[in-house]
Image (cartoon, rainbow, N blue to C red):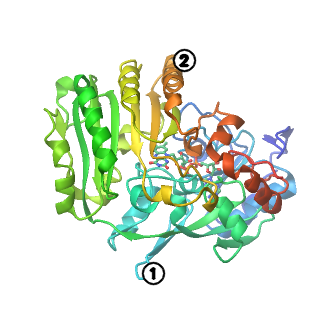
Amino acid sequence: MRARTMEGREIELKPDAFDGLRLRLRGPMFLPGDVGYEESRTVWNAMIDRKPAVVARCLGIADVIACVKFARENDILLCIKGGGHNIAGLAIADGALMLDMSLMRGVWVDAKRKVAHAQAGCLLGDVDRETQVHGLAAILGFVSLTGIAGLTLGGGFGYLTRRWGWTSDNVVGMDVVTADARLVRANSDENTDLFWGLLGGGGNFGVVTGIDYMLYPVGPEVVGGVVAWPASEAHKVLELYRTLADKAPPELTLIALMRPAPPAPWLPKEMHGKPIVALLACYSGRPEEGEKAVASIKAFGKPIGDVLVRRPYAQLQSLLDATQPKGRRYYWKSEYLPRIEPALCEKVIEHAARIRSPHSAVILFQIEGALNQLGDEHSPVGNRDARYVLNAAGSWEQPGEDRANVEWARDAWNDMKSFSTGGTYINFLTEDEGPERIEAALGRGLARLAEVKAKWDPQNVFRTNRNIKPA
Ligand SMILES: Cc1cc2nc3c(=O)[nH]c(=O)nc-3n(C[C@H](O)[C@H](O)[C@H](O)COP(=O)(O)OP(=O)(O)OC[C@H]3O[C@@H](n4cnc5c(N)ncnc54)[C@H](O)[C@@H]3O)c2cc1C
């Protein structure tokens, strides 16, 4: 049986090498060939094909501690899988002992304190489902199948970001198993340096086993959904986006996208596969006000489809799920933007017209608001000057189409990156993006992150991530 050391050296192990680990676990353990191994080792992006030496599907904190101890004692590389949605496949490493957190999906809501404790294997939809029982919501992302751990540890943004900031700005504490296999609490009173590092610095400092989120009254009904027009209307629609987004109240978040129309039932059949421009909106305040806020979108020109309506917040949170299924091939290029300029809109139209696959899109997310009101030193997620996110999102099915689709995303990005703040989102970086892109994402916090790393993980046990070397 082959495995890798923490330094990445390949080693040959005896067939019973992991028997000792199995005895220490409450959850199941899988070796290559076992039922469960393939499901655990595959991630959202089918471009990633790596084979861990062993998978431990942890059932609780004691299992996590057992894995960290075992990896340390036997010098085996460790990797951690949350929701498995990282586009670079950071959850999986060849030859590693993989902690699969997918059985740890409990959520406990304290409605009085407006705080939810979520186990680190939760997907976004797990948290929304439980918090919405109380008419509350955490600040999470747009696709309900994404893991909370990876999203939160890299920053996190979604429909509520304009009102309350990055996801990580709304974390009140984390439970962490450290490199020396101790369970510690990180919050604004305890282990404050570790807490600071976890708010955007990636999973560099330990295995997070639980996250406490601040909650806010949202829903259960909001106004949200999509309106679409043929791409021939893109100049006008993107101008509408620019002007509306510029004066939108914080309750309203607007996203513009261009792509070939998906085969969705709310779009006419004859438009499927044809280029469209669409505006996605969420008004998270009172629905009556939301209807007024989105009226000009619904009344604009002649839409080919309109599902921008009152709906449950939890439903809106999963509206995009089907457009991003696990198992396709994905490649993104992304930048933060300080504003939307007319010249950028021209480029969006130009590059959308060159899309090479029925699933790809150019997307502009609005995030401006609360996140801009904190200083860069608040947490390593930084990028407090970001007001929009640009994503050239390539998505296709066949390996033979890799080159054309990757090239499309790279060309679009090369042509549009001059509009950037200079910063990029750590959680959108692809496998081939190296240190200079980590610098673009975390630049201002890197020196302090290296100090936190030196204190909490001096031997770099947690390295299969956007790795920060100990100072
Ligand atoms: C379809 C899709 C939609 C997305 N939408 C959004 C969005 O709306 N907003 C947004 O901000 N981002 C979004 N993202 C990006 C997302 O935040 C990242 O992909 C994130 O890494 C996903 O987290 P995960 O737990 O699923 O990832 P994984 O691939 O499981 O892990 C990612 C990284 O986190 C580490 N990690 C995971 N769990 C733990 C843990 N318990 N302790 C320590 N480290 C851990 C892993 O080791 C790895 O390095 C989206 C991604 C996809 C694919």
The relative height of residue 303 versus residue 129 in the rendered view (above or below) is: above
**What residue sits right under mark 1 in the picture?**
113
Relative placement, left or right, of 157 versus 84 is: left
Along the line of sight, which residue is nearer the eye, 427 or 346?
346
Kind of residue at disc 2? Arg
Along the line of sight, which residue is nearer the eye, 157 or 61?
157
* Residue 105 drawn at (x, y percent): 51, 63
* Residue 67 drawn at (x, y percent): 74, 59
Of the two numbered discs 2 and 1 on the same chain, state the one appearing first in sequence. Answer: 1
Res. 319 in view: no
Question: Mark 2: which secondary structure?
Answer: helix
Number of marks in the rendered image: 2
Q: Residue at x 58, y 59 (%)?
A: 375
**What residue sits right under mark 2 in the picture?**
403
Kind of residue at disc 1? Arg
Relative placement, left or right, of 92 versus 141 is: right
* Residue 342 drawn at (x, y percent): 36, 30
